Image (cartoon, rainbow, N blue to C red):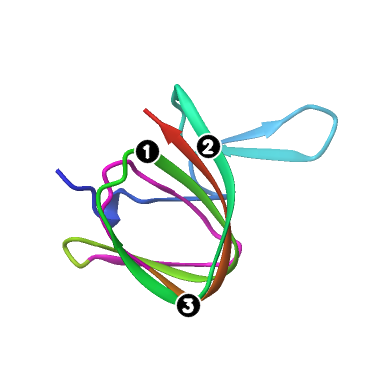
Amino acid sequence: MSKTIADIQRLGAGVGAHSVLDYGMDEEDWCAARGQASAYTVGWWEGRVGAVEFPATTADEIVWLAQGHVALTDLQGGRIEFRAGEAYRLPAGFAGRWETLQDAKKLYVLLEP
């Protein structure tokens, strides 16, 4: 079964289990997900305005959008947009359309099953 927009998880302050850390600085942490990965890829992506259809992904992807504006649309027509400074987890099994609405740059981590 294909994943949908409802399965995409926004990441960032205020999302997940909150902890105030006590390591000698003023720190807080929001743990949105935990898991084990046998393999991972970390990278930096840059793209210009455009769109592409893509099949179901095989890995979870953690994304922090450093610049730009993008949209994801699932196979049922659900749509979500992200702007610079926002982060999200795209679940393995998501298929649909990626649109770069404004030239974008992202830091990503692929977590293979």
In the picture shown, does residue 54 fall above or below 77? Answer: above
- Judging by the rendered image, the residue that carries numbered circle 2 is 41
* Mark 3 nearby-residue class (10 Å; few <14, some 14–19, many ≥20): few
Is residue 37 found inside the magenta-colored segment of the image? no
Q: Are marks 1 and 2 in contact (CB under 8 Å)?
A: yes
Mark drawn on residue 104: none
- Residue 39 in percent (x, y) is at 47, 26
Mark drawn on residue 59: 1
At 24% across and 53% down in the image, what residue appears? 4
Q: Secondary structure at mark 2?
A: strand
Numbered marks: total: 3
The CA span between labels 1 and 3 is 24 Å
Which label's residue is closer to the chain start, 2 or 3? 2
> Which stretch appears magenta?
78-98
Quadrant of the snapshot with the C terminus: top left
- For badge 1, the amino acid type reads Ala
At 23% across and 48% down in the image, what residue appears? 3
* Mark 2 nearby-residue class (10 Å; few <14, some 14–19, many ≥20): few
* Mark 1 nearby-residue class (10 Å; few <14, some 14–19, many ≥20): many
- Residue 85 in percent (x, y) is at 61, 62
At 42% across and 75% down in the image, what residue appears? 50
- Residue 6 in percent (x, y) is at 28, 53
In the picture shown, does residue 62 fall above or below 104? Answer: above
- Residue 102 in percent (x, y) is at 52, 78
Q: Are marks 2 and 3 in contact (CB under 8 Å)?
A: no
- Judging by the rendered image, the residue that carries numbered circle 3 is 49
